Amino acid sequence: MPKVMILDHVLTEVFALEKVLKNAGYSVCLLTGAYGLLAKFDFEKPDILLFNPDMPNMETDSFLQTLMTAPTMQNMIIVLICSGDANAIEAYCRQMNLHGYYMIENGFDGIPEYLSHFYDD
């Protein structure tokens, strides 16, 4: 199973996601702040990033550009975990060339199946 990094400052979301993903067999690593981010990526080498774009002290566009141009990160699947206007979020994902988004309003139980669409078993 792929390794998933959860990058989110909302601890209730982080722990709920971690539980659901681990129960589905995923390897999970957590990060709740922007500090030391790239070093953590280099160390953990996740296959999938679940990212809350509303994190404080984070320049989301700049972070995503840096991440997507780093040679070791180019094959990583990036999925936003967020709430709000799905049409606006989808447009943002297209603009930034992200793989997709998952709406928090849907609950987290469906996220393992959603992520499985991005890779072969």
Image (cartoon, rainbow, N blue to C red):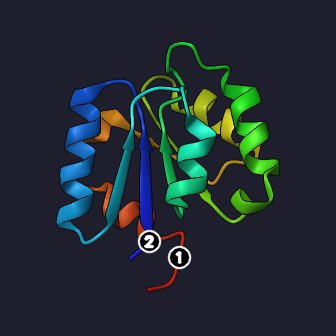
Give me the residue at 60% from left, 19% from top.
58
Q: Residue furthest top?
A: 57
Residue 113, image x and y in percent? 34, 66
Instruction: Quote the CA–CA distance across marks 2 and 1.
Output: 9 Å
In the image, 100 versus 68, the foreground residue is: 68
Disc 2 residue crowd, few under 14, some 14–19, many 20+, Cα 10 Å: some
Give me the residue at 54% from left, 69% from top.
118
In the image, 35 versus 4, the foreground residue is: 35
In the image, 115 versus 3, the foreground residue is: 3
The reply, left or right, for residue 17 in relation to residue 75 is: left
Q: Is residue 84 above or below residue 102?
A: above
The answer to whether one can see residue 26 in this image is yes
The reply, left or right, for residue 59 in relation to residue 104 is: right
Q: Which residue is mark 1?
A: 119
Residue 60, image x and y in percent? 66, 26
Q: Looking at the image, how many numbered discs can be counted on the residues?
A: 2
Q: Which residue is mark 2?
A: 2
Q: Which is nearer the N-term, disc 2 or disc 1?
A: 2
Asked whether the beta carbons under mark 2 and mark 1 sit within 8 Å of each other, the answer is: yes
Q: Is residue 84 above or below residue 5?
A: above
Give me the residue at 54% from left, 56% from top.
43
In the image, 58 versus 37, the foreground residue is: 37
Amino acid type shown at disc 1:
Tyr
Residue 18, image x and y in percent? 25, 49
